[in-house]
Amino acid sequence: MLDLIREAMAANQADAATYSQGVRIWMAVMSIAFLSSVIFAPWKAGARWILAATLVNILGLILIKAFFPAFSRTMIGTSVHLIFWTPVLWMIWRPSAATRRISDFEGRSGLIYRVWFLAASAIMATSLVLDARTAIGWAL
């Protein structure tokens, strides 16, 4: 099993190495934005949702590639993003979470969290739009 995981990770890295520099920069921006959620996760539910989505994404990339090696990293990543990130965005922006969001944004530390939260949300939403475009392209 560990060999499968190692091979899947190497295959994903090899796939990513073929991406354009712009795509690799975008992936780095997403990684930094989403993994930085660990800073806020102990206190903020929105950060925990984004961290959970990131961990599901990483595990999905590795495990799906391990069991379905013919699937490209793009196919796996796009599918995992569309399936799991869409509900995460809904959970952190749903109307019933507005009161909690407002209280999370209060104070000096709340301002830092708000900037991160808005940036991470915008990055996730932008990625979902790009992923939807990719998926629509597959269907046509």
Image: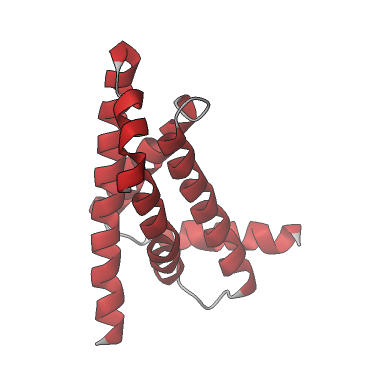
On the image, the x and y values in percent for residue 13 come to 48, 56
Q: Is residue 44 above or below residue 66?
A: above
Residue at the image position 47 percent from the left and 47 percent from the top: 54
On the image, the x and y values in percent for residue 82 come to 38, 65
Report whether 4 appears left or right of 24: right
Instruction: Identify which residue, 97 or 110, lies in the foreground.
Output: 97
Report whether 101 appears left or right of 14: left
Residue at the image position 47 percent from the left and 60 percent from the top: 14
Residue at the image position 26 percent from the left and 37 percent from the top: 119
On the image, the x and y values in percent for residue 22 come to 23, 52
Question: Which quarter shows the N terminus?
Answer: bottom right
Report whether 70 appears left or right of 7: left
Q: Is residue 31 above or below residue 83?
A: above
**Residue 15 visible from this viewpoint:** yes
Q: Please count the marks in the image.
A: 0
Instruction: Identify which residue, 26 or 110, lies in the foreground.
Output: 110
Residue pushed farthest right?
Answer: 1
Question: Which quarter shows the C terminus?
Answer: bottom left
Specify how the rendered protein is coloured: secondary structure
Q: Is residue 49 above or below residue 9?
A: above
**Residue 17 visible from this viewpoint:** no
Residue at the image position 35 percent from the left and 37 percent from the top: 33
Report whether 69 appears left or right of 14: right
- Picture quadrant of residue 19: bottom left
Residue pushed farthest top?
Answer: 108
On the image, the x and y values in percent for residue 57 come to 49, 55
Instruction: Identify which residue, 10 or 41, lies in the foreground.
Output: 41
Residue pushed farthest bottom?
Answer: 140
